[in-house]
Amino acid sequence: MVVGTTGVTASDVLAVARGGARVELSDEALAALAAARGIVEALAAKPDPVYGVSTGFGALATRHISQELRAQLQRNIVRSHAAGMGPRVEREVVRALMFLRLKTVCSGRTGVRPSVARTMADVLNAGITPVVHEFGSLGCSGDLAPLSHCALTLMGEGDAEGPDGTVRPAGELLAEHGIEPVELREKEGLALLNGTDGMLGMLVMALADLDTLYKSADITAALSLEALLGTDKVLAPELHAIRPHPGQGASAANMLAVLKGSELTGHHQDDAPRVQDAYSVRCAPQVAGAGRDTMAHAGLVADRELASAVDNPVVLPDGRVESNGNFHGAPVAYVLDFLAIAAADLGSIAERRTDRLLDKNRSHGLPPFLADDPGVDSGLMIAQYTQAALVSELKRLAVPASADSIPSSAMQEDHVSMGWSAARKLRTAVDNLARVVAIELYAATRAVELRAGLTPAPASQAAINAARAAGVGGPGPDRFLAPDLAAADAFVRDGRLLAAVEAVTGPLA
């Protein structure tokens, strides 16, 4: 992965954070770093105070710092700001955090020396992952504590995880990989801390996961429609064309592709005639589509943020070094919260379909709870309880973090975004949504198989076959259910459900 002054993409972030891709700095980036550093050093030599170069920080910015104390100032800001608490955050989050800070450093807008940027790349390439804690960012002035823990590792201080997964003193890990700790100079400590990199990295990864989950939810909705003997006429393209939300049309098209060739659809007028299917079935594309459109907006915000150089102060192309408020995380925080709302609603409608499959009064001929011998067997009764608990938690996680603000730094930083918190709860929401979709898959595949004498769509049958091969059990007497649900969760989460269906339908939208 070659990092230049611009052009980092979401795919690049995923490759480094999850794929362990190596990072190199382009000649263009090294030249930009050197040029910006020259400007900072010229300002540092002047008697006039410049924020971040020759002053304190935040509410202490009024103090002019003499030349002999400036290196200590930069070390101190890293040490004092590395004040996180709570559980460690995931390795992929920390790698995304470091890579995105390196991306901004290489823009030539921060005034960091090329040698510091090289060390950042070396730490990533060595598989050294700083210990970063859950709490410590308010999402304004950057993800301060998380980024400070990363900067501390560059200095050879604090703890980090080695490539073998063992947490050890960072200095030992750097020495083992032949990496010299950095000696920070003017502006550099501040430049390593002032970014929205943590919340942005988590946004990028959430969008990648949600892309798989929304397609998987279209599949499970189609399976539920089949199992309930519903009609696919509501998915006709001409119906969705007159309400032209792109996500809605894509979701309806996906469901229609999955249902192609099914003998189970269109029986809503048989023994117990229905004029229409329930909303949870009929309105599946409208709900999933709204979430897809929310994802599209969030992706646009992520792309803009990936193209940004977030620091304070910044080195401008004309050589000025100016303070700014670009570190405020509001743009990212809002869409993180929007996505959590959409995830909660997608989980909610999926749970309603599952409950309908299990209720003999609404399932149109399926056995109660899809049990083998109802009364002796409880079937999937408690699987739905688990799904309901997950959906309830999703609703709590949908309460926006970005609607809150708490003053800090002696009222200098008197409005903050809480974007890191929004990102952390979105990660939990995405995990829970995968479990909800997995339970719908588990119920719907069992229900389809219980419709004896009617052949499901080829894509549906492919999903069922792949699920069974993955250890997701089918109909039968009661058994220990947790392993089946865990297998279904893994089957959805890692994309095998989507791959099995797309092998029949071609790529879903």
Image (cartoon, rainbow, N blue to C red):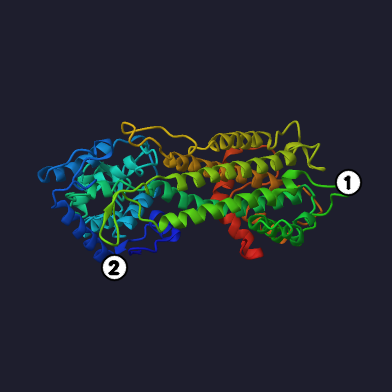
Q: Quadrant of the C terminus?
A: bottom right
Is 416 situated above or below 179? above
Q: Please provide percent x and percent y for residue 494.
A: 53, 53
Q: Please provide percent x and percent y for residue 363.
A: 78, 41
Q: How many marks?
A: 2
Viewer-proximal residue, 141 or 381? 141
**Residue in the image at 88% along x and 46% along y:** 273
Residue 166 visible from this viewpoint? no
Residue kind at label 2, given as amino acid type: Glu
Find the distance from the CA under tag 2 to the CA under tag 1. 69 Å
The label on residue 198 is none
Q: Please provide percent x and percent y for residue 64.
A: 17, 41
The quarter of the displayed image where residue 461 is located: bottom right
**Residue in the image at 29% along x and 68% along y:** 28
Residue assigned mark 2: 28
Residue kind at label 1, given as amino acid type: Pro
Q: Quadrant of the N terminus?
A: bottom left
**Residue in the image at 54% along x and 53% along y:** 297
Residue 492 visible from this viewpoint? yes
**Residue in the image at 15% along x and 45% along y:** 70
Residue assigned mark 1: 273
Q: In the image, is 431 to the left or to the right of 354?
A: left
Q: Secondary structure at mark 2?
A: helix
Viewer-proximal residue, 108 or 167? 108
Q: Earlier in the sequence, mark 2 or mark 1?
A: 2
Q: Secondary structure at mark 1?
A: loop
Q: In the image, is 268 to the left or to the right of 411?
A: right
The quarter of the displayed image where residue 211 is located: bottom right
Mark 2 touches mark 1? (CB < 8 Å)? no
Tell me if mark 1 has few (under 14), some (14-19) or many (20+) residues whose alpha carbon lies within 10 angstroms of its own: few
Q: Residue furthest left?
A: 68
